[in-house]
Amino acid sequence: MNRFFKCHLIVLSSLMIFSCSQGNNNENSKDNPTLENITISGDYETEFEVFDDFNYDGLIVTAHYSDKTEMAVVPQDVSYPDMTTVGEKEVVVTYETVTASYTINVSEVTPYEGYIILAFYHLDIALNDNEKHYLNPVACDFTPNPDLNMPYTFDSSDETIASVTKNGGVYSSKNKIGQCVITVTADNGIKATCTITVMEQLPVKQKIWKQVNDYDSLKSGDILVFAAPTHGVTASLNTLHSKLNVVSSSFCNNYQNIDSLGEGTIEFALSIEDKGMTLESQTGEYLKCTHEGKVTLDSSLNTNRFWDIHSNVDPDTGEGSINDGAVIENNVESLGYFMFNVSANYFSTYVDNSLRPNIMELPFLYRLEYVD
C-alpha cells in the first residue's frame, strides 16, 4: 500500500517537537474514480426476422464508477449477431474495458396477412375479342391499407386460351375456347386469381345502370353516371358556364335502375389511385372541382380531380341510410361536396350542405352492368 507522511512542526518556547503521522491515498481515489461496470436500458428492438438488418436504435448504455456516480455513454463496440438463422442471439456491448450483453430473438419471416383486390375475379370474353381487360390489382392488409405501389407478376395457366401482359392486361389468344386461370402475385407473396372463360360468341346481354348502395364495392374500371332519380335526370355531357347540365333518363318505378340513359348523359370511368378516386369522361377529361364551387370537365392533373366516394351515413352517429345516395367529396376540403341543385337544375358542388333540404340534394351513383 502506498503511504505518505504528514509532518507537523510544533514550537513550544525553545523546545521544538517534530511529529509525523501516516496517511493513505483516499483523497486521490476520489479525484480519479474507476469504471466498475456498465448497464443497458432503453427502448431497443429485441425481436427480428431472418435477414432483417440488425439495429440497436434506442439502446442506452450507463457507466457506473467506484465513487457511486453514473453517466450515459456511447458504446465503443456493439457486436453484430448472425441474422441468417433463427434463434436467440447474444449482443455484446463494450465500453472501455467492461462489457454487458443482451439477447435478441431472430424468428422466421411472418407471412403477409392481406389480400389483393382485382378489377374482376371472373371474366367472359369472346374468341375474337380485340380488347385488353385490365386486372388492376391492389394489395391490402386487414386494416385495410392499400399499397398502390406494390409490384405484381402475372401468369396464365393456359396461354393457348388467354394471355396476360406484364401490366395485367388480359386478352384472348383467338384460336381456342375454354377456361384458364390468371394468377396475380404481389411482391410480398400474396396471390389472387381470376378465371377467364373464352367463348365462341358471348351471349347478348342488356345494359342497365344499377344504383350503387355498397360503395365499398366500387373498383377501378367501373363505368358510372350521376343521377337525381326522383327528378328523373342524369348529368349531361354538355356544359354551360362550367356547370353540368341535366338530361331526362328512363328510371324504373323504384329508381333502383336506369333502363336507358338520355342522349348526352356523361359516363365516367372510375380509377382508384393513391390520392383518391378519379372520374374520367369518354372524352378523356376528368370530373373536376373548381374554386368557384362548380363541377366541370378538365384535362389537367391537379388535385381537384381526386374524389372520395362513400355512403351517406354519419360514421359517428350511424344516422342516415345507404339508400340516401352517395356522398362525393373533393379531396381538397375547401371545395366541398358533389351536389344536385334542385332549383337551378344542374350538378355542382357546395361546401356547406346545410341548405340541402331546400335546394341541394346528394346525387345517386349508377354503375353500368349487364344482365341476360
Image (cartoon, rainbow, N blue to C red):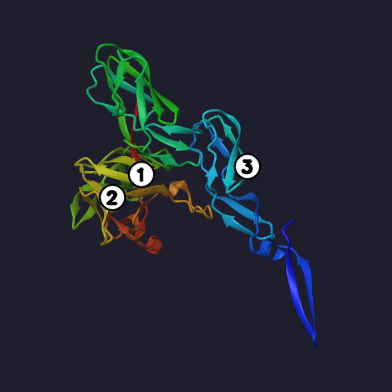
C-alpha distance separating marks 2 and 1: 13 Å
Compared across the picture, whether 263 is left or right of 251 comes to left
Q: Residues within 10 Å of mark 1 (few under 14, many from 20)?
A: few
Q: Amino acid under label 2?
A: Arg
- Circle 3 SS class: strand
Quadrant position of residue 15:
bottom right
Question: Where is residue 158 shown, x and y percent of the image?
Answer: 34, 14
Q: In this picture, is 200 found above or below 234? A: above
Question: Farthest residue toward the bottom?
Answer: 13
| Residue that numbered label 3 is attached to | 101
Residue at figure coordinates x 41%, y 39% from the top left: 147
The tag on residue 256 is: none
Which of the two labelled residues, at mark 2 and mark 1, occupies the earlier sequence position?
Answer: 1
Question: Where is residue 170 shown, x and y percent of the image?
Answer: 30, 24
Q: Nearer the viewer, residue 47 or 62?
A: 62
- Circle 1 SS class: loop
Which of the two labelled residues, at mark 3 and mark 2, occupies the earlier sequence position?
Answer: 3
Which of the two labelled residues, at mark 3 and mark 1, occupies the earlier sequence position?
Answer: 3
Q: Amino acid under label 1?
A: Asp
Q: In this picture, is 359 found above or below 195? A: below
| Residue that numbered label 1 is attached to | 274
Q: Residues within 10 Å of mark 3 (few under 14, many from 20)?
A: some
Q: Amino acid under label 3?
A: Ser
